[in-house]
Image: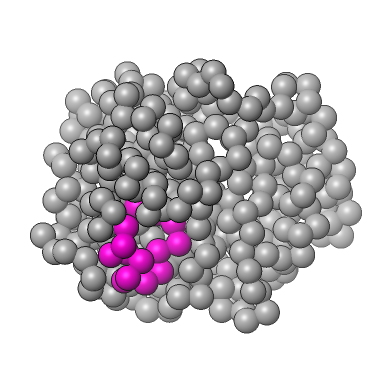
Amino acid sequence: MMVIAELAVPVVAAPMAGGPSTAELVAAVGEAGGLGFLAGGYLTTDALSRQIADVWDASSRPFGVNLFVPDHANTYLGSVTERPRGLSGQERVQAVAAYRAALLGEAERLGVELPRPGALGPDDWERQLDLVVRERVPVVSFTFGLPGAAVLSELSRSGIETVVTVTDHDEAQAAIEAGVDALCLQGPDAGGHRGTLDEAKRPSTTSLTELVASVRSLTQLSLIAAGGIATPEAAAEVVAAGADAVQLGTAFLLTPEAGTSLAHRRALADPSLRTTTVTRAFSGRWARALTTAFVRQHGPSAPAAYPDVHHLTVALRRAAAATDEPELLALWAGTGWRGAEAVPAATVVAQVARSLPRR
Ligand SMILES: Cc1cc2nc3c(=O)[nH]c(=O)nc-3n(C[C@H](O)[C@H](O)[C@H](O)COP(=O)(O)O)c2cc1C
């Protein structure tokens, strides 16, 4: 089934891990004719399974599930020879330990114990793949890596449309060669994490419109464009460049259906927060967030060590949320955050769709 090519309204609600994506948001966007995504990142398989069941209960429209690809399943890392090398095992442990030491003051103040480097749980990758097949999820998108051709073809055989997030021409080529059904092209203005297939690589700064045009010259696959789309005009521009649909994250953060925390909602509307920054401070992977004191202080020294840095800072962020200290939260936001409005998700879909061709 080709869901993306046949959407009544070519607007996608981005998967947003860490709370904002909810079954309610996904169902509302689907009912409005667009495509909503659940975010599997950071969720246990059981929690994701409950969210999928909730979407099936609330709506009969197609929807998607997004999964983070762990390094061991990321075939892009083996396929590229000419790329800057990341930290070696020992360097990584030392860099994470140094970053941990830099955060100890904040942790003590909040009464939080920071985990020791290396104390990571196993990921749920295989179980999440089994789940999306078992539950017949219509669309599955991947970020942070390129699953192998065998995984992609197994999902396709199960009737699932597969999407891989890429951030440059080379990554798009690799995903096409692996046999993906559609691509999510993410530009530099995107809120949240860059979906770069190799965390050691500095993410591309090529504009989203240029990226769409260059990948369109490579392939006829469905292309979803994401990153900083905050107006109908911006959506129309990437569609004119060759995108089949637009994906928005930040624009949905203030909708009542989203699970965005109160502190994050307040920060998005706070006039004293004036800029966004692409930082590794929270997770060890580049991501765009509102520029807070934490970002300014710790961003420059944060190592390229995802998910170790994520696990290091997560307890700190939970404690900050409990004590309502937005400065320590990962306030993900794209460059168009000022355009986000507290209106129903269906209104966001309709507003963006105004300038797009209906099918
Ligand atoms: C709060 C937040 C969480 C996000 N989480 C994910 C995620 O779990 N998986 C993913 O593929 N992309 C994630 N993204 C990135 C989006 O897929 C998308 O690329 C981005 O939101 C587009 O830029 P925009 O926010 O300016 O619309 C997230 C973005 C935000 C703002």
Q: Identify which residue is drawn at 39% across, 47% down.
A: 211
Q: Identify which residue is drawn at 26% across, 23% down.
A: 153
Q: Quadrant of the C terminus?
A: bottom left
Left/right placement of residue 259 relative to residue 240 reads right
Left/right placement of residue 345 relative to residue 350 reads right
Q: Identify which residue is drawn at 40% across, 41% down.
A: 165
Q: Start and end of the magenta stretch? A: 225-238
Left/right placement of residue 159 relative to residue 335 reads left
> Number of labelled discs?
0
Q: Is residue 280 magenta?
A: no
Q: Identify which residue is drawn at 51% across, 18% down.
A: 78
> Looking at the picture, does residue 247 appear above or below residue 204?
below
In x, y percent, where is residue 72? 52, 22
Q: Report the colour scheme.
A: one colour
In x, y percent, where is residue 126? 42, 26
In x, y percent, where is residue 68? 47, 38
Q: Quadrant of residue 265?
A: bottom right
In x, y percent, where is residue 272? 68, 79
> Looking at the picture, does residue 201 appear above or below residue 275?
above
User: In this view of the protein, can residue 310 be seen by the observer?
Assistant: no
Residue, far left: 359
Q: Quadrant of residue 274?
A: bottom right
Q: Quadrant of the N terminus?
A: top left
Tell which of 114 and 348 is nearer to you.
Answer: 348
User: In this view of the protein, can residue 200 be seen by the observer?
Assistant: yes
> Looking at the picture, does residue 354 appear above or below residue 210?
below
